[in-house]
Amino acid sequence: MIRSAPSAPFLILRRLETERLILRPIVEDDWRALHAHYSDAECTRFTSRRVLSEGESWRAMASMVGHWQLRGYGPYALVEKSTQAVLGTVGLWYSIELPKPEINWVLTRRYWGQGYAGEAVRAVQRMALECLPDLSLISFIHREDAASIKLALAVGASFEREVEFAGGLWQIYRHPAAKTHSAILMQSRRITPPASREEVRHLVFRTRDLVLERAFGNCIRVLVPDPSGNPYHARLYSMMDLERHDDATEFSICVRRCSFIDDDNGEEHRGVASNYLCDMRLGEVLQFGGPVGYPFAIPEDRSADILMLGMGTGIAPFRTLIHQIYDELGGWKGKVRLYYGAKSPLEMLYMNDENNDLANYFDQPTFRAFQAVSPQPHIDAPAALDKVLEQNAAEVWEMINRRSTRVFVAGTVTMLDSIDKAMVKLAGSAEKWTATRTRLVSSKRWSEVLY
């Protein structure tokens, strides 16, 4: 697959949640809330050591947004669930002055002392261990900033050394490192027809390093050799078909061979992780981190409706779900609907002549699958997922508004625009859809795995 790509893909999840907080991408409207921190001398005493103007606060916010593009990760806006108030920022930061990437946090003073920063930092730690296990993380703290030192120690970081920086003494606190595991490639088979331009492979691995959880939506972070000189190049893949044996565990992943066009010079570059995986030979060893847990959970109520919206290799966790509810649980009473997009019928993974696993479930009375293809596959136009949703508007909107329905979204970040476009039409207005989606998210009935 050839696609246009930004200078650096995002390496971590774009949204995290805790009991009280949402960590989401920063948007321009956040600058006023962040200015409440940067214009407070007590808040900036150990960082900029002066208050910032409104323009300087806006530029500080813009640098955080740009950090995601340059590094593939960055700070999140820290939002209180109950009020939707922006409390500050928390996340990963690696400017050229720092010796290592750090977990950084800033909090407006009115929210100090309520445990928000610790709750957010722990969420970032968990995410980093799962998504970037090869990244060695620190926190860089002024030696007189007692509150930040106390928090770093509370979340498990340990003092490493003291250094001179910007005319003062700063301390480095090291966060706990991730563990990596290994697996042997047992099987590699192409699941797109030979006539398709897209090569997608189903890979089966065996590991003895750990007992993986058999949970719908769980992923691993594959760690392949990095041609740029870093220890690893990491990418996230959903696990399927997990089977435990006496001495090992087997699992599968679905991999699309990718390449991208450099926007600056027009040159084509092979995707590092996907090409490494597709080229692996049987018996070779893969290094990986995880498993990475995602908020996909099979509802306890078997009469609940399940709406799955997928694109590309995002089909992988849905294939696992369908197998579990019909083969292992013995069936499902609620509606199970799969809306899946691909460039052409040949790229309908697990629904084509080369591999048609999902056809085994078409006779289930509660299951239906709907396919969306690209109107212009020759120019890599996105699949018309919105059109298929609109064609089934009455049922989709009825399911969305049913209190027991769970909505699962898996695929590329770009598919969200197509989904939102359709849902706005189904709802009748952008405001109504925003309110509906907020209710789904807050009640844990809307879950995403995006890459």
Image (spheres, rainbow, N blue to C red):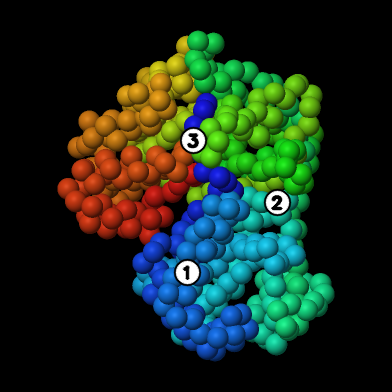
Left of 19 or right of it: where is 203? right
For label 2, the SS is: loop
Q: 220 above or below 187?
A: below
Query: Measuring 58% from the left and 64% from the top, which residue is drawn there?
Result: 91
Q: Which is nearer the N-term, disc 1 or disc 2?
A: 1
- Please state which of the two labelled residues, at mark 3 or mark 2, is closer to the viewer: 3
For label 1, the SS is: helix
Q: Which is nearer the N-term, disc 3 or disc 2?
A: 3
| Res 302 visible | no
Do tag 3 and tag 2 residues touch (Cβ < 8 Å)? no
Looking at the picture, tell me which residue is in the foreground, 353 or 76: 76
Could you say which disc has been placed on residue 4 in the image?
3
Q: Amino acid at mark 1?
A: Arg
Q: 300 above or below 47?
A: above
Left of 273 or right of it: where is 178? right
What is the spatial separation of the Cα atoms under label 3 and label 2, in whole angstroms? 27 Å
Do tag 1 and tag 3 residues touch (Cβ < 8 Å)? no
Q: Amino acid at mark 3?
A: Ser
Left of 172 or right of it: where is 257? left
Could you say which disc has been placed on residue 133 in the image?
2
**Picture coordinates of residue 448, whole percent (x, y):** 45, 47
**Picture coordinates of residue 234, whole percent (x, y):** 66, 43
Q: 137 above or below 376?
A: below
- Residue bearing mark 1: 59
Looking at the picture, tell me which residue is in the foreground, 317 or 130: 130
**Picture coordinates of residue 79, whole percent (x, y):** 44, 68
**Picture coordinates of residue 405, whole percent (x, y):** 34, 46
Do tag 1 and tag 2 residues touch (Cβ < 8 Å)? no
Left of 251 or right of it: where is 171? right
